[in-house]
Image: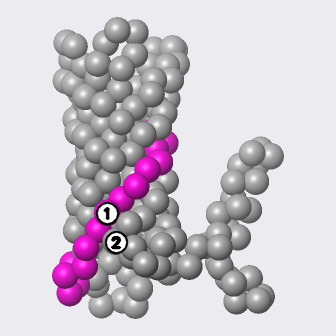
Amino acid sequence: MSKTAAVVLAFLSLMLFPTTSKAQLLPTGNVYAGVAYADSVDVVNRLTFRGWDGSVEALPFHRFSYLGIVLDGSGIYRTGVQQYNLVLGPRVSLHYGKWRPFAHALGGIQQTNSSGATFHPVLVDIGGGVDRKIPFKNFSWRLQFDYVHSHLLSENQNDYRVSTGAVWRF
């Protein structure tokens, strides 16, 4: 394991799990892990991808419980192409009984590996979805839709991604 990966893992462990003094750096939030399907449209081509999506959301403001900060990572794949996204930004949400609809606007970086070349464009991810509580304590099921726009070498790329998976609330 690289030193960077070890530091990131240690940081996330400290943020998400209580220490012996019962203190947590993130008082409330959630962790999401799911599968993703993406449709990518560049200037000429339309490609479909399958992969994964995951996020950590912190709800640090007790007074503004509808506002969270999200770190989202995803990887989508097809033969000869690998694409990874890492984005950060705000998410707003509301609670209606067992339902929690949300919307977010995130920004970050993408890494695309294609035909031996690697590109790192800046991207914008605008999306939303809904969480539905399930009978297991502190768990929900998420359905999420995202529009991801990147710009590299004078070309635009528009990706549409849908993902679904489990959410653990803490």
Coordinates of residue 153 in the picture (x, y in percent): 40, 9
Residue at the top extreme of this rendering: 154
Examine the image and state in which quarter residue 140 appears.
bottom left
How many residues crowd mark 1 within 10 Å: few (<14), some (14–19), many (20+)?
some
Residue 113 against residue 154 in the figure, above or below: below
Secondary structure found at label 2: loop
Q: Marks 1 and 2, Cα distance to the nearest angstrom?
A: 5 Å
Residue 15 against residue 128 in the figure, above or below: below
| Left or right: 86 as drawn, with respect to 66 | right
Question: Which residue type carries mark 1?
Answer: Val
Q: Which mark is residue 2?
A: none
Magenta region: 85-99
Residue corresponding to mark 1: 92
The residue located at (49%, 53%) in the rendering is 71
Examine the image and state in which quarter residue 168 appears.
bottom left
Camera sees residue 15 = yes
The residue located at (31%, 12%) in the rendering is 155
Whether residue 94 is in magenta: the answer is: yes
Q: Which mark is residue 66?
A: 2
Coordinates of residue 92 in the picture (x, y in percent): 31, 63
Residue at the front extreme of this rendering: 63
Question: Which residue type carries mark 2?
Answer: Tyr
